[in-house]
Image (cartoon, helix red, strand yellow):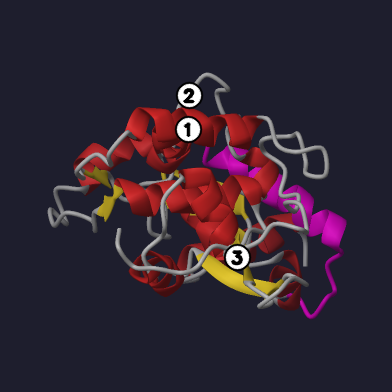
Amino acid sequence: MNTAQAKRVLETALICAPQPLQLRELRALFDDAVGADTVAQILRDLQLDWAQNGVELVQVATGWRFQSRPEMREFLDRLHPEKPPRYTRATLETLAIIAYRQPVTRGDMEDIRGVTINSAIIKQLEDRNWIEVIGHREAPGRPALFATTRHFLDDLGLRSLEQLPLLDKEAVAADMFDALVPVSEASDGATGDALPAVASAEPLPDAKAEDETAVARLVNPTPTSTSNPTAAGPLPTDATPMVETDNE
């Protein structure tokens, strides 16, 4: 099989696939007769071939896929005018904390936000397949450690956590998730689901003071944790989770 034929096969498979395809899956199309380097080069060639079209070939966390370009969203939304799910600011703040400080316990999240986190928020993010439990901290009660999933990265159109936008050190905790908005908008036309808009919510008492304290802890972590705001380093192992209450 020559390169032109292989490109045609790969293009067809990627267009028809309901989910992103990994390199090993693409090689299986040829019974591994085509090397990984050759397949990778063909994928790059396909990206160039589609560079001027309304659809682009991208690599996300779980593989390669075709998706519509962001500028096509305005027109495609007319085919499906229903609005996407809306989430409260508290939900998106919690997701942002997990994304930037993972792995974290619920107690860690509550320490950063300055308020207790409703169990429904965690369940909502788990049901959306954006977060998951990846282990337990060796501390009293062995609290669960939460991290984002590869599906979360797919929905943002990212390959890895290192592609998350840098946090503005002057931003307050209430605006932490806003750093993700440009990336989420860029993936709204993707095969995967894009992140929804923020739903309005009543401000918490003394929200400004709580936010300033939270962001100070976020961007100036203790010496035992990572100082890189985009890294997925662990928080101090001696962090004690707060008692779980559902009053938010």
In the foreground, 179 or 233: 233
In the foreground, 235 or 151: 235
Read off the magenta span.
30-51
- Category of crowding for the residue at label 1, using alpha-carbon neighbours closer than 10 angstroms: few (below 14), some (14–19), many (at least 20): some
How far from the left and from the top, in percent, is residue 7?
A: 66, 57
- Category of crowding for the residue at label 3, using alpha-carbon neighbours closer than 10 angstroms: few (below 14), some (14–19), many (at least 20): many
Quadrant location of the N terminus in the rendered image: bottom right
Q: Which secondary structure dominates the residues rendered in magenta?
A: helix
Residue that mark 2 sits on: 171
Residue that mark 1 sits on: 179
Label number found at residue 146: 3
Q: Please name which of the two marks, 1 or 2, marks the residue nearer to the observer.
A: 2
Label 2 is placed on what type of residue? Ala
Asked whether the viewer can see residue 178, the reply is no
Mark 1 or mark 2: whose residue is earlier in sequence? 2
Label number found at residue 67: none
Against 171, residue 7 (above or below) is below
In the foreground, 76 or 215: 215
Mark 3 or mark 2: whose residue is earlier in sequence? 3
> Which residue is at a point 75% across and 53% down the rendered structure image?
234
Would you say residue 195 sits in the magenta stretch? no
Q: CA distance from mark 3 to mark 1?
A: 20 Å
Label 1 is placed on what type of residue? Ala
Against 152, residue 162 (above or below) is above
- Category of crowding for the residue at label 2, using alpha-carbon neighbours closer than 10 angstroms: few (below 14), some (14–19), many (at least 20): some
Q: CA distance from mark 1 to mark 2?
A: 9 Å
